[in-house]
Image: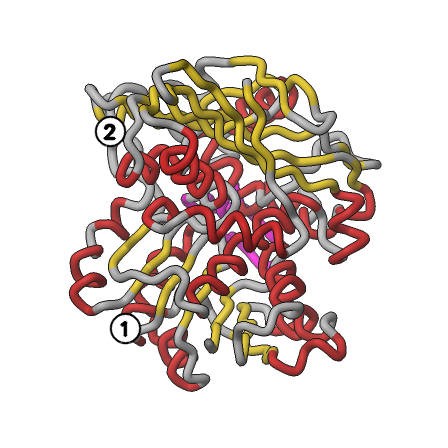
Amino acid sequence: MRVLLVGAGGVGTAITRIAARRPFFDTMVVADFAPARAEAAVAALGGDGGRFLAERVDAGDEAAVAALLERHDCDVLLNATDPRFVMPLFRAARTAGATYLDMAMSLSRPHAERPYEECGVKLGDEQFAQAQEWEKAGVLALVGMGVEPGLSDVFARYAADELFDEIEEIGIRDGANLTVDGYDFAPSFSIWTTIEECLNPPIVYEADRGWFTTEPFSEPELFDFPEGIGPVECVNVEHEEVLLVPRWVGARRVTFKYGLGREFIETLKTLHLLGLDRTDPVTVPSAAGPVAVSPRDVVAACLPDPATLGERMHGKTCAGTWVRGVKDGAPREVYLYHVVDNQWSMAEYGCQAVVWQTAVNPVVALELLATGVWSGAGVLGPEAFPARPFLDLLTAYGSPWGVREQ
């Protein structure tokens, strides 16, 4: 297997450090718009970097990405950029006939008249619109293969296959007790992506209604997270699992709730109130004259890079899938979860917990594809594949998962 990894930020760098310990691939080309970032990711591997090459590429330039795939004879494109670049990279992989993996799907657009009741363009719609073309060509696009979406979807498939006869509800629940020394507000993941998923209308799925939307931060609930994290208030946000799970797993209701905390929610609301969540450029004065900038990009530039916060960060992050249903005629309720302690991920990989937890899952998926344990064609989510091999391999990577009876 020869992999083109596009994006050498926090998650991309973590991918290289995890993959360097595994023998399943021949070459990984690490490409970024900023060549210094790609070179730094490769250089950090030291003696383990022999299979890694650094390149420069603009993720929005489909032709350049396709040419890079062909020049290095890569048969897989792994997308570690933010969601703005999903579609150009998705199309570039298709042009080159390469397998495609991402960790976030094509962007949504709210319904023009009823944004908090009806769906407009949903997450992943642009990708699923091309599913038939990919399937006909015999090429695989594995979409949403991070931690959430990704591992959370694998948990849903595992629950359906091994833990339940009937499923009433699947709810992804994400929470943490992470703190960052020296910062009053320092998101542990990309603020660009966080704004996108938290301020867009959340989507809920119900079998008798289909997909519909609610208002941001709706339906708050207190969820008790394992391994010492404890109770965290979780609210509805827009996320890919709600669009993916019902396509392959039978459930009467599917939700995604994120443990943001009251202060974080109020900060996001303020950004929205001031228009600082907008992506359309505004014109501002500068020493060189008027310049067009995206307010959201300015916010991101003003905050610390999440990948650099590991040394200041303390605590644990938990990703998991809560499932309620029936097994052998009796009610059952479980929480399948994966916890990463920042102290462990920093000591073992030099990566903060949130980016490491995101990065390990596409590497596990790549290994399953390389060994033929997972295979397929078309545009498929993690639920389309058997869950047990993934969970066993994740444990073999030194990062076990758990199941808690509720």
Say which quadrant the C terminus sits in: top right
Q: Nearer the viewer, mark 2 or mark 1?
A: 1
Q: Is residue 170 magenta?
A: no
Q: Tag 1, which secondary structure?
A: helix
Left/right of residue 268 with respect to residue 256 in the rendered view: right
Q: Is residue 293 visible?
A: no
Could you say where residue 93 lies in the image, as x and y percent from the top left?
Answer: 34, 69
Dot 1: within a 10 Å radius of its alpha carbon, few (fewer than 14), some, or many (20 or more) residues? some
- Number of labels in the image equals 2
Task: Please say if 88 is above or below 172.
Answer: below
Q: Is residue 285 magenta?
A: yes
Q: Is residue 397 visible?
A: yes
356 or 260, which lies in front?
Answer: 356
Residue found at x 53% / y 68%: 33
How far is disc 2 from disc 1 in space, using C-alphas? 33 Å
Could you say where residue 311 lies in the image, as x and y percent from the top left?
Answer: 82, 47
394 or 95, which lies in front?
Answer: 394
Of the numbered discs in the image, which one, if any, rests on residue 112?
A: 2
Q: Using the rendered view, name the quadrant where residue 111 is placed.
A: top left
Q: Which residues are magenta?
A: 280-296
53 or 278, which lies in front?
Answer: 53
Could you say where residue 255 lies in the image, as x and y percent from the top left?
Answer: 40, 25
Left/right of residue 97 with respect to residue 343 in the rendered view: left
Of the numbered discs in the image, which one, if any, rests on residue 95?
A: 1
Could you say where residue 127 lies in the image, as x and y percent from the top left?
Answer: 27, 52
Label 1 is placed on what type of residue? Thr
Q: Using the rendered view, name the quadrant where residue 101 is placed.
A: bottom left
Residue found at x 20% / y 61%: 135
Label 2 is placed on what type of residue? Ala
Q: Tag 2, which secondary structure?
A: loop
